[in-house]
Image (tube, helix red, strand yellow):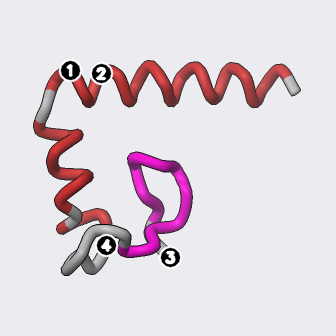
């Protein structure tokens, strides 16, 4: 099962017409916008740090 790179959970095909992350409009929008991509990266790092603390 492919994982959603935005929500870090299994892809549930939430974007109409998508067959997975490879053709998901949401993934495309986030990955094509440098500010959104950087914000997602920072959130991911913060979540990983928090998970390691527990």
Q: Nearer the viewer, mark 3 or mark 1?
A: 1
Foreground mark, 3 or 2, reads: 2
Image quadrant where one finds the C terminus = top right
Check whether the beta carbons of the residues at disc 1 and disc 4 lie within 8 A of each other. no
Residue designated by label 2: 38
Query: Marks 2 and 4, Cα distance to the nearest angstrom?
Result: 22 Å
Q: Is residue 30 left or right of residue 13?
A: left
Q: Looking at the picture, tell me which residue is in the foreground, 26 or 45.
A: 26
Left or right, residue 1 beside residue 51: left
Please, is residue 2 above or below residue 45 in the view?
A: below
Element under disc 1: helix
Return the x and y of residue 46 as percentages of the image width and height.
Answer: 58, 20
Mark 2 element type: helix
Task: Say whether disc 2 or disc 4 marks the residue closer to the N-terminus.
Answer: 4
Say which element carries label 3.
loop
Q: Sequence-wise, which precedes: disc 1 or disc 4?
A: 4
- Give the residue drawn at x 40%, y 46%: 6
| Disc with the residue nearer the chain's start (3 vs 2) | 3
Measured Cα–Cα span from mark 4 to mark 3:
9 Å
Q: Residues within 10 Å of mark 4 (few under 14, many from 20)?
A: some
Q: Quadrant of residue 24?
A: bottom left
Determine the main secondary structure of the stretch shown in magenta.
Answer: loop
Q: What residue appears at the point 19 percent right and 80 percent down from the top-left corner?
A: 17
Under circle 4, the secondary element is: loop
Please tell me the numbered disc located at residue 1: 3
Q: Residues within 10 Å of mark 3 (few under 14, many from 20)?
A: few
Tally of numbered tags: 4
Q: Please give the residue where the numbered disc 4 appears in the rendered image.
A: 20
- Looking at the image, tell me whether mark 3 or mark 1 is earlier in sequence order: 3
Residue 4 is inside the magenta segment: yes
């Amino acid at each position: 099962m492919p994982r959603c790179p935005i929500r870090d959970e299994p892809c549930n095909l939430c974007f109409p017409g998508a067959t997975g992350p490879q053709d998901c409009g949401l993934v495309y929008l986030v990955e094509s916008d440098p500010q959104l991509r950087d914000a997602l990266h920072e959130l991911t790092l913060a979540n990983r740090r928090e998970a390691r603390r527990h």
